[in-house]
Structure formats: C-alpha cells, structure tokens
Amino acid sequence: MAKRQKCITIKANAMAKSQETKKLITEKLIKAGYIVSDKIEHDTIMIISVGGDGSFLKTCRDFRFPRIPIFGVNTGHLGFFAEITPDRIDEFIEVLKKEKYVLQDMYLLKMTLCTKDSKIERYIINEAVIKGCRSRVVHLRMYLNGELMERFSGDGMLVATSTGSTAYNYSAGGSIVDNSLRLIQITPLSPINTSAYRSFTSSIIVPGNRSTVEIVPEYRFENSILIVTDGVEHRFKNIESMKFEISNRKIRLVRMPGYGFWHRVSEKFLLKE
C-alpha cells in the first residue's frame, strides 16, 4: 500500500508579497510530496501562516485556536511570531521533511465577560485592552484573587500573557518576560493618581497557575466599554466585570532548530552595529 501524503494548510493575507510567497511555498511543498490546502483537512499536520504578526493572530482565530502546530513565514514588518522570511523556504522544507523542528506551547488567556444575564468567553494570545468607548478617562477597579488591588483612572488597562509581553504591552512600558512562563501581566495606560483613584504606575506580574484578575468598570458617562483583544475591537454594554485567567488551552508554534527567545528579542528590538 502506498504511503499517504501529508497535508499542509496555508493561509496568507491579501498583500501581493504574501500571495506570491504562498504560491511559492505551495509549489515547493507539492514538489516535496505534500498535499496543500486552504482549509484544515482531517490529515493536516501543520498550518503555515504567511504575513505579519496580525496575520498570524487572525489565522489562529479563523481556525479557532487549533491544536495543529502553526508555522509563520514573515512578509510583514516585526514578525515576532513568524520564524522565517521567504528566502528560507527551502531550509524550512528540509527541516519539515526530517521533522527536526521544535514545538513551543503558548497558553491562552481566557477572558470571561459577565453581565446580569449572561457570560461571554473569549480566548486571547497576546493581550486584552480595556478602555472607554469614547476619548474619555475610564474608571476601573482591579481585583486579584477576589481582593481589591487598585482603583484606576486613566486611558485604560492592559492584561497580557507572556507571549504578549513583547507586543502592545512593551510599547506601553510593560516588561518583556520569557514566553515560556505562564503568567499574567497588568499594565496601566496613562494612569492618573488622585485622592479617589490610586493605582500602580508600572506593570505588575502575577503567576498564571493560581491567579484570577478581575476588572470592574465604574461607569460615569455611559454604560459601555471598549475591549480590544489581539487588535480586534469589541464594544459591549452593561458589562459588570471582566475576569482573566491563564487557561489550559494552548496553541503550538513551530520553531526552527536553535530558536532562542532572548536572541529573537535582541534581534527584533535592539539595533545591531
């Protein structure tokens, strides 16, 4: 009996460079003996996302955070999730054929939105940002494991995973943490300390395996809130609380041999001489 071919699912954004790269990868994979599809098949062994970090996050959402390993090819700018650029496709295929790649588990942040009548759950890779729906100061209470930690006034609060520590969190002044750690980082956005509202002016980091972060809005002007999860905006009314915890659900990122997190941080964020 002939050995069944393995399937690779490829998803690319609409940019011309991404579409050209997808076509090139498809041709090379077929030549190497693989089946290629635009959707997940029953025998899909890997998903390839072509684009930037935003495309990678969208691929994960579109496929509902699959258990199938995901590999990133960067045709964007920063490309922190992506492992290679298009000029290294041949090298990747050799690694794929020999199964020499490394799998990195990335645990998702679970967000539960509570109203009087319902609960809404969302899973997040990088971060959730809580703001007011209009360009006004937002007032929030933050609880850690049921204990009131702070009353916040300012632009908003950001709740990030270790994976998201290098994204918006870093731009907002949060700490970069090793993405192998299961933790939650809470970073204030332009906090305003007054006699009524006192909050941390820097990020705090809590263990993900035994921490629940709850944020409760204090509505002053309208009963709506803006929540941005991995760059996607959601507007909600009558939210009473937002609870965050690290879930056991995860995605598996494919890394090339020799991948090192801190080398990648240095490569992406620091100037080289």
Image (tube, rainbow, N blue to C red):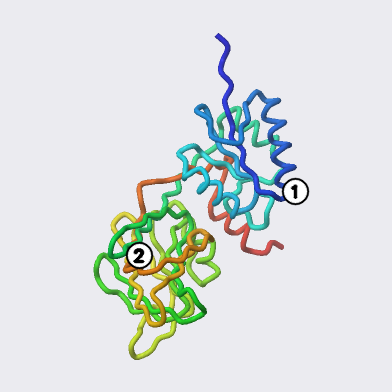
- 1 or 2: tag closer to the N-terminus: 1
Quadrant in which the C terminus is drawn: bottom right
Identify residue for label 1: 16
Q: Identify which residue, 221 or 79, lies in the foreground.
A: 221
Q: Is residue 215 left or right of residue 169?
A: left
Q: CA distance from mark 1 to mark 2?
A: 39 Å
**What x and y, as percent, mark residue 183?**
38, 58
User: Residue at the location (69% across, 61% down)?
Assistant: 272
The picture places residue 157, in percent across and down from the top left corner, at 43, 71
**Residue density around tag 1, few if under 14, some if 14–19, many if 20 or more, within 10 Å:** few
The image quarter in which residue 91 lies: top right
Look at the picture and state if 8 lies above or below 158.
Answer: above
Relative to the observer, which residue lies in front, 180 or 252? 252
Measuring from the top left, give residue 63's x and y in whole percent. 51, 43
- Left or right: where does residue 163 sit relative to residue 26? left
Dot 1 amino acid type? Ala
Query: What percent of the width, then of the height, locates residue 83?
Result: 61, 46
Which residue is at the front of the view, 181 or 239? 239
